[in-house]
Amino acid sequence: MDNLDRSIINELQGGFPICEHPYAVVAESLGTTETELINRLSKMEQENTLSRFGPMYHAEKMGGGLTLAALQVPDERYDEVAEKVNAFSEVAHNYAREHLLNMWFVLATETPERVAEVIDDIESQTGLHVYNMPKQQEFFIGLKFEV
Amino acid sequence: MTSEPAIIDAIDRRIIEETQGGLPLVPQPYHVVANTIGIEPNELMRRLKQMLDSGIIRRIGLVPNHYSLGYKANGMTVWDLPDELITELGDKIGRLDYVSHCYQRPRHQPLWNYNLFAMVHGRDRGEVSAKVEMMAKLLGEHDRGHEILYSSKILKKTGLRIGRGR
């Protein structure tokens, strides 16, 4: 990664314009060309340096439901429970974590009401209590990861 | 606090479906998306600006892959802070440059006494725990207990998607 790659990453975390030739506008502020910027971004995409490039949508504002939930799963049932939880299309991420609460998943649903239904279904299918931890407040996150 | 959902129509939904995977890397990306959907580029740009204004789009931009940038360790840190100070302290923690997400969430006593979550990134677990020490120092007497939950395995990762029916 060279200086241009670094300035591209730093610059584009802040925002990308909506206009006829947005890459040309950004390229000019970075002192490079539209073609070079597009080539660099394509390369970063191929090398998996980017996890996303585009609009970041806000799930709740689109009318959907979103929550983080955790389970305390007995070791001997871990794989079976993971399979049951993952089978729900509403489960967007699921991580094993080193804690008494050892399974943590994000539910993203089409409607806010659906969150409670999915939690009930997971509880009845696994026989385990779901610890529901919806966000109550989101704190400001500044521009991140200067590279 | 969650705000009221904004109104989106069928065309906005099509725009979301077409762009949630990313923008095309071509000189006129919005024209390409507009053509795919079958609307005028100006209409697409107007709707994107509107969704930015109403907060449906947080921002248009780039998210680097922390892992490939060398931030190979991340810890979900959880904190027991006084409820009456949560807004002030959460704001302070969220602004730290190694914290990528910061939320207040409900306690589930007695098993779970934590009310603040902050995702902390570092090159390795040693760096993550050093940063957590700095956070604890910053919080001082208000830190009534904290833990770092490292992820040992990704069990599922599909990302957030709407229009799953397609």
Image: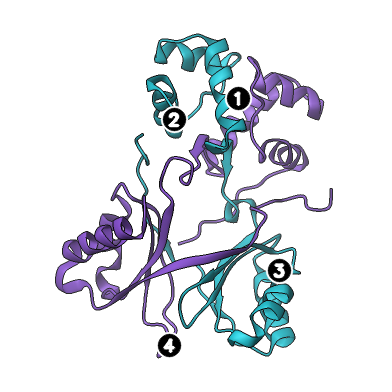
Chain colours: A cyan, B purple
List the residue tagged with mark 4: B111
The x and y percentages for residue B87 are 30, 63
Q: Nearer the viewer, mark 1 or mark 4?
A: 1
List the residue tagged with mark 1: A42
Q: CA distance from mark 1 to mark 2?
A: 13 Å
**In the figure, is residue A71 to the left or right of A83?**
left
List the residue tagged with mark 3: A86
| Residue at (80, 27) in percent of width and height | B36
Q: CA distance from mark 1 to mark 3?
A: 32 Å
The chain to which mark 3 is attached is: A
Query: Does residue B81 sit above or below B21 in this rendering?
Result: below
Q: CA distance from mark 1 to mark 4?
A: 47 Å
Q: Are marks 2 and 4 in contact (CB under 8 Å)?
A: no
| Residue at (33, 50) in percent of width and height | B98
Q: Callout 4: helix, strand or loop?
A: loop
* Residue type pointed to by label 4: Leu
**In the figure, is residue A119 to the left or right of B34?**
left
The x and y percentages for residue A11 are 41, 27
**In the figure, is residue B18 to the left or right of A106?**
right
* Residue type pointed to by label 1: Ser
